[in-house]
Amino acid sequence: MSQPCIFCLIVTGQAPAVTLYEDDQTLAFLDINPINDGHTLVIPRQHHQDIHSMDEAIYRAVAETTRRLTEKIHAALQPDGINLFQANGKAAGQTVFHFHNHILPRYADDKMVVEVHGKLGVDHAELEQLAERIRQHL
Ligand code: 5GP
Ligand code: ZN
């Protein structure tokens, strides 16, 4: 038998969580293994493995709860910065397969490394080819 989804268990109250906010579509709670104090997860109540199965309304609801909680965490904890992070798929680092946004309060002296700067000097024509592949799906 496959394991029940831990975040679905939190939604139904069958697993504990320290909840910060909830409404009819979303839930925000503190991460059990935080990177820094205030590390928060925002999820849809409805089970979605990742972004690929979410419709616009649910994504908007999660995005708005994320925005709102980010402002509250900023006001309450006054960190030096905040990262938003979200993983889709094992290769992207996803470990819990119920969609979630991470709100990550950051401090100038924390040791967390976020690296989104890749190879420099890429050929413009190469970018144009890639863009065309994506535009065909818009
Ligand atoms: P991912 O690696 O999928 O982006 O992040 C999963 C996050 O869920 C991790 O930061 C992990 O600490 C958190 N997490 C896993 N299980 C639980 C749990 O039972 N309760 C809470 N509050 N967080 C959890
Ligand atoms: Zn779930």
Image (cartoon, rainbow, N blue to C red):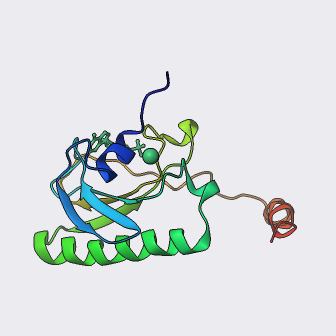
- Give the percent coordinates (x, y) of residue 115: 45, 51
Q: Residue at x 29, y 48 (%)?
A: 10
In the image, residue 71 above or below residue 95: below
Camera-side residue: 24 or 7?
A: 24
Classify residue 75 as left or right of residue 13: left
Classify residue 49 as left or right of residue 34: right
Camera-side residue: 2 or 84?
A: 2
- Give the percent coordinates (x, y) of residue 56: 60, 73
Quarter of the image where ligand 1 sits: top left
Quadrant of the frame with the C terminus:
bottom right
Classify residue 50 as left or right of residue 69: right
Hey, which quadrant is residue 44 in on the image? bottom left
Q: Residue at x 78, y 60 (%)?
A: 123
Q: Residue at x 44, y 37 (%)?
A: 95
In the image, residue 70 above or below residue 108: below
What is the number of callouts on the image? 0
